[in-house]
Amino acid sequence: MEFTLIQKIMVWIIPVLFAITLHEVAHGWIANLLGDPTARMLGRLSLNPVRHIDLFGTILIPAFLLLTTGFVFGYAKPVPVTWENLRSPRRDMAVVALAGPMANLLMALFWALVVKAGLMINSEMMTVFLVATGVAGIFINLVLMVLNLLPLPPLDGGRIVNGLLPASVSRQYSQIEPWGLIILVVLMVTGVLGKIIGPPIYYLLDLISGVAGISDAKLMAVLYLLGLYK
């Protein structure tokens, strides 16, 4: 059994949209709590994915990946944060940055509940759809969490490290940021990125899927359907 393109779209679309949307909303929500209302004033605390869509990152890249690899990944428009408004700018920026990956972790746990619910339904078609959607949700959220926690500016992990470093070292560390995305692309093209983030992603996937009650055999079968396992 294999999923058609339409079935893959149906399985991936909701997990991907909410993974990237809630990641950005979490940044803005925490920034608002810490004194910066920029995201709230611009309407970016909304759960409506339309407010966060980036033509390139939310539509074109996911569509290209789905057509060429069967796997979907993307990103939303970054939520604006005016760091000068924060009560303790360096510390609070680290907290704001951490909020996105933590939101993805919570969403991965939510999708584990979807998997658990799917396994309890006495309908093969609905079970396959819910379990596949749930596993896709767990996977995409773990990818976003682990990727963003890499200590490389401008990723969230880089901002977290930046907020923890002494001010003098922090200024030097920040100079990496203009090169951060280039470094990330090089790591991706050379296959090094997959070797770095792959093991923690699949370890957490196995752990959270186990909590959901899905066996290793069923998990491998779903990953195959999603194009994540050959």
Image: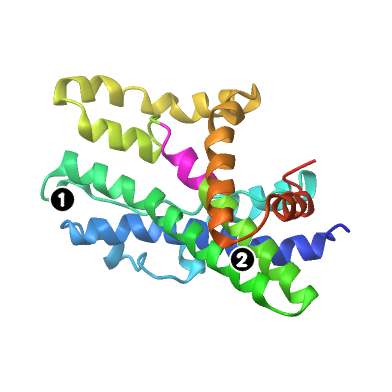
Q: Position of residue 199 (x, y in %)?
A: 57, 33
Image mark for residue 126: none
Q: Name the residue rendered at 72%, 72% in the picture.
A: 127
Q: Position of residue 215 (x, y in %)?
A: 67, 55
Relative side of 66 to 201, left or right: right
Magenta stretch encompasses residue 148: yes
Q: Which residues are magenta?
A: 143-150
Q: Name the residue rendered at 22%, 35% in the picture.
A: 163
Upstream in sequence: badge 1 or badge 2: 1
- Residue 2: quarter of image: bottom right
Q: Name the residue rendered at 53%, 53% in the picture.
A: 208
Instruction: For the N terminus, give its image quadrant.
Output: bottom right
Depth check, front residue: 188 or 123: 123
Secondary structure state at the residue bearing disc 2:
helix
Q: CA distance from mark 1 to mark 2?
A: 39 Å
Relative side of 97 to 194, left or right: left
Residue located farthest toward the right when viewing the structure as drawn: 1
Depth check, front residue: 43 or 191: 191
- Residue 11: quarter of image: bottom right
The residue that label 1 is drawn on is 86
- In this view, 75 is above or below 176: below
Amino acid type at circle 1 is Leu
Q: Position of residue 70 (x, y in %)?
A: 76, 49
Amino acid type at circle 2 is Val
Q: Residues within 10 Å of mark 2 (few under 14, many from 20)?
A: many
Q: Foreground mark, 1 or 2?
A: 2
Image mark for residue 115: 2
Q: Are marks 1 and 2 in contact (CB under 8 Å)?
A: no
Q: Name the residue rendered at 52%, 37% in the picture.
A: 200
Relative side of 156 to 147, left or right: left
